[in-house]
Amino acid sequence: MRFKKYYPLFAVFFLLLISNISFAQSDLEKVNSFDTRFKQYEAAIKNAATLDECKVIGENIAKLKTDYADSKTLIEKSLQISYDEQFAKIERALEVRKGDFTQIVQLTTEVGSLKDKVSDLSQQNEGLISQIKVLNLKSAKDAATIQSLTKLVAQLKSNIAQRDELVRGIVDSLLQEFVKTPGSLNEAEKQAVFKKVDNGNLFFNIERTISDNIQFMKVTQTTPDDLSKMKEQYRDFNKVWRQIGPKLGEVYLNRSDKSTQIANIDNMFAEWNSRLNEEIWGQVNKLFRDKKLAVLPFKSGDQFVNSVTSFIDDELKNYGVKRASESENTFYSFTDSVYFKTVQPVWIPVLVENNMMTEANKDTVESRIAKWKEKVAPGSKMNWVYIGGGAIIIFLIVAYFLKGKKKVVAVNEEKKE
């Protein structure tokens, strides 16, 4: 019974204990709630897909800062952080993310302008190609037709060059950062790529660029300079595509329509290169055919070497069987009229530069030509001809002067008599 007088004290102590535990739980929940929301906003900044989302995140961060201002000391002590520094850090991260979307808006505007220019040039090219086809179908071309054809081809060439440059500009401006991005993209970054590609109509414009370059070869007579420049354009463009194509394939992995387009562009690049190679080798083949030289057709550096050496070997075997003059005519037609006149100075630099043949291939061909020369037109034979001819000329000159001198002497003697 004597403990009854302490009951009030026990009751007060118990209430204080319960109260402290409740306050402790409330503080812990407050700290955890703050920490959870703060981390959510950090993640939201990284995954933001639009400028509007960034604006909402900014408003939420400002509200979080205000809501927990009274608990600043508690939060700093519990999480071992600086309250103000943490908010300064997250606010800077948000501004950086906003900057990303501002840049995208600027690029979208720029791409929209480029897209319009590309579309105009594409329509012009389509009309030019149709007109050139019509003029080419005319069996007899008068001067006016030829002049119109020349003008249309020049305009088409200029348009294609401009359009190629614009499309490359779209690729470079939209995908420069994308190419540099390491690893896989998060969903927000993928959405940004989708927007860039769609706004630039990128896939269609790449396809159209390749198609127009192929059409240009079909409807015009290309020069070595044309083909060299087109090969360089292909090489540069294909290099960029090989960098971005696989990355775009990863981004559009679940979009079958886009995956199909990417695969189609891969095939179109292969076709473009194949058509260029066919055109280049076709023009080199034609040089031999035009001179009625029976060199077997070739489509590569090794085939070129094999065809030329086979032709020369046949000529060497037949030397002495057919007339010497005929063998010599074939030799000079091959060397002076085709190989050393056009193939070596004009086409071989293009072929070597574009890895279509090697310096070793060139050396092999010219070594075989040198052996052919030794047989058909050896240097010693030619030298004796030149020496003999020179000796005859010298003899005639000396004889002429001696004859003149004798006449002068005879005249002088007559005068003395």
Image (cartoon, rainbow, N blue to C red):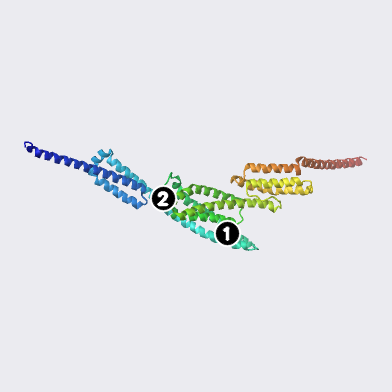
Q: How many marks?
A: 2
Where residue 34 appears, as percent x and y from the top left, is 27, 44
Where residue 191 appears, as percent x and y from the top left, is 40, 51
Q: Report which residue position mark 1 lands on.
A: 152
Q: Are marks 1 and 2 in contact (CB under 8 Å)?
A: no
Q: Is residue 207 visible?
A: yes
> In front here: 2 or 373?
2
Q: Is residue 377 visible?
A: no
Per the image, label 1 sits on a secondary structure element best described as helix
Which of pointers 1 and 2 lies earlier in the amino acid sequence?
Answer: 1
Residue at the extreme front:
1
The answer to whether 64 appears left or right of 131 in the picture is: left
> In front here: 386 or 102?
102
The kind of residue tagged 1 is Leu
What label sits on residue 387 in the rendered view?
none
Q: Report which residue position mark 2 lands on.
A: 190
Mark 1 Cα shell of 10 Å, populated few (<14), some (14-19), many (≥20): many
